[in-house]
Amino acid sequence: MKKIFGICFSYFAVGFVACICISFFLLNKSVPALLPGKTPVYLFLQSLLLFFRIVPPLLASVFLISLAIYFKSNSEKAQMRFSPVMAGHFKTVMIVSIIFVFIMTLTQQVFTPVVKRQTENLTRAPILLEEYITQGNACLEEENYSLALRYGAQAFKINPENKDAQTIIDSANAVLKAMEPSPLLALENEKNDMVFRAHSETENETVTSLMKKARAAAETGNWLNAHYFSELALAIGDEKDVNFEEAKRLSSHAWNNLQAAPVAMKTKDQELFEKKKDAYRSLSAGDNIDAYYKFLEISYEDAAWSYDPDVKQFLEVARARVESQHFFIDETDRIESFESSSDVYFSANHKDGNFDVVFIRGVTPMAQSGKMVQYLRGFSLYSFDNSGNFVKSIKVPYAKMISYPLESFGKEIQQDFSFEKKDNVPFIMLESIDRNHRGKIISPEYEYSEFISDTEKRTEKYVILPVTTEDFNTILESSSESSMNVNSLLKIAPKADKFGFSKEILGASLIEKITYPLFMMIMLIFFASVAWNFRLKESELFKFIWIFMLPVGTIIVDFLFQAVLAVSELFIYVLIGVTGNAAIFVETGILITALVLVSVFFLCRKSS
Amino acid sequence: MKVVFSFAAYYFLTLLTSLIISAGVFMVVSDLTLLVAGQSLTFFNLNFFLQGIFYSAPFAVFLALGILILYSIVHREKVILNLFSVIFFFIFSWLLVIPGNFILKEKYEQHEHSPAGKLFVQTGNFFYEDGGVYYFSKIEANGTLDGVFIDLTGITGEAGTITRLDNISLDENFIDRYAENLIHTSIKVPSFLMFGIQVYTTLCENALAAWNNGVLSWLMFISFALLLFSCSAFKNISSWALADFIVVATVSLLAVLLNYNFYDGIFVQYADYLWLVNSAVSLLFIITGIVLYQVKGRKL
């Protein structure tokens, strides 16, 4: 057996060296633009890809020839079929085959995608770098220094030696350090540290703890806070709660005190108080956007006012509440170049049989405070009823998607979905407002079928897609790569038709990948029989000129493999059409039978 | 006698098996033109199968003759008998089987046969066509369709727009493209295979044309067969059977490529002289074969 491995390893090494030579001497004419110094790495990766491509025929052809040499000894002992000599040979054949098939599968299905991705990163790097620098400079011009700094930092990460990146970083830092920190600036810097606070306002609180805070505020005359905390207590408690009655009383008492403030006095403080009260009223009434802008305007009007603890606190609260249902227009500035998927489309069925067709032009993922958030560019949703009639459509230039567990929504909403409570679903916000100034608002466009009456037309500002976040991400993956890895395929192939994709195509791809090792095993054992039939005679020595059979043999084997794999793919396709989801088991069954047959064929070889 | 019997057995066995498999593949590919995503597929279709047989007969013959040559390499003992058997089956194939195939094919095509089947568009899945993606949500009673069209390449004027389809009707063209579309998106044929099929189809077409042009032109075409036969001259080139087989196979493939280039490649302008080239090269190979046999000698 050592001899077999010796021969195989030498040819393997020769093949690898050949690929490197081809890559460095032939392919170096067509290298795309790369970062300085990366060309050798790129060429090496290309040689790896080339090598991985030829590994299966390489191994198969050298397997055949080395076995033909190996079988020459003791061959006349195999007088009868199923002789012990053949059994011994079969053991060798099996061991070598398994190792070779393992190498083949590894290179085809694991290493190749990894190397391909590395290559893509290399080719993308200079493009990204240029994009970051352009955006960074544009931000500097617009005096948006914090954003400029972020772009500069990203550019720096790609290529630390890039002078433009360094310039951007330095310029931005210089300005930022010189500016006086103000609460408003702190707000700007927190742009991307959003936290979904609608829940967290009451996250660690109970009715009792909230009431304690409310009472404490009432004692110091801070009626704003007294009302706020007692209202929160009312929101999370229910009638049976011990403190419920007290909360109601305190809340209305605080409100009365707020209303009763004297109007005549016009000191600065009282002006502030009036404005705060007005803004708080909006907040209390649920008009979060109005409250947000009002508090913002208070802090703009007077620098001293922006330090007021109430203003700071309630601006935060208002902002958090606004952000639970809206996002800011500037969040979507300049993120188009960082899209991870584009032209995503799928259909999704609701529990009641209606279905939606969703199309998204581009998806940009971002990490915000530990959560993954996705910005959807060019979001369109077409709804149809269960007979296929058009109902309505929603289109918006940018939408923001956050993933929440189903249980965080109200019972009414939960009932519309057939998922588990703990499943995450995509919550998509459709409306965006200006962060700093009232007035600009981007709303979705609605279109309705003529059969919908005016009263039925609803213009909700958010949408919850009837798919789990996991499925959504798998669909995104399948749009960005033309060939998916086995994991994603496994997840999506069984339900492909639910999303409007062809189960046959995805399923065939999946079955092919899974059965590849079995398939190659069958080929190798068949080659072992061929090797036996063509074995060298006992006395024959290997002539040097026969070495040239190897490359020719590799080419012929490659043709054979490609033809057989193509036909097998066709067959799998038909199998799926005929047997549906059971196709994988049928195919595996067929292959195992073939393996047994081919092994028996080998074992009954004899010296004729 | 036993040898001749084995020859015959291998020839017909290979012919039959490769005919069935190739015809099967052809039938499946044609089946897929009727495949509508999600619906169960009818596997066997007689018309497609017959078409498959006629299409792939020459290929089956090529394989069968190849197996015969392989057999004569492996069992080299009865030299003269081997030689005559191979020659016999070559003549049998090229003067009987392949022309027979042409005649039967014509007869079949003149018959009226029922249309392959009806294809109808299905609702509920995406398919890529016309630079965008169609999704049909409903087929109305009068046959028109509702749905949406997602423009991915700007064909409707602006890429990225999605337009509603309301009561549009399908034309014949569309259905054909729909069928083709399914096959193209599903079956990724490797480029070498496409080339191989192209070579094969070109050669078959020219063979048919030659046969229809009269006996003389058919005999001129058969110089190709002579060339293929003469490639087996290399079977004595080495003392190792495997090496012999690889050499013969490679030379045969090169011969095929050579002939292809006269019909549709670099040598197109010399197409008339193909039979001359074939005959000359065959003569060369045959002489080489005799020399090799004398030099290497088939000593048992």
Image: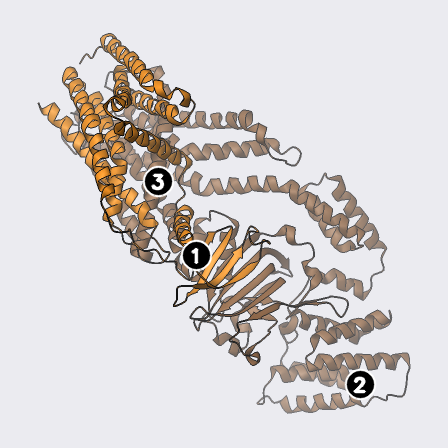
Chain colours: A brown, B orange
Q: Which quarter of the rendered picture does the N terminus of chain B lie within?
A: top left
Point out residue B297 in the picture as x, y percentages from the top left corner.
Answer: 22, 10
Vertical relation: B90 (above or below) B20: above
For image coordinates 33% across by 52% down, the residue present is B34
A440 vs B15, left or right, is: right
The residue identified by callout 2 is: A221
In the rendered image, residues at marks 3 and 1 fall on the same chain: yes
**Is disc 1 surrounded by few (<14), some (14 to 19) or many (20+) residues within 10 Å?**
many
In the rendered image, residues at marks 3 and 2 fall on the same chain: yes
A332 vs A49, left or right, is: right
Query: What amino acid type is highlighted by mark number 1?
Result: Phe
Q: Which chain is disc 2 placed on?
A: A
The residue identified by callout 3 is: A565
**Is disc 2 surrounded by few (<14), some (14 to 19) or many (20+) residues within 10 Å?**
some
Query: What amino acid type is highlighted by mark number 2?
Result: Gly
Mark 1 / mark 2, whichever is N-terminal: 2
Mark 3 lies on a secondary structure that is helix
The residue identified by callout 1 is: A501
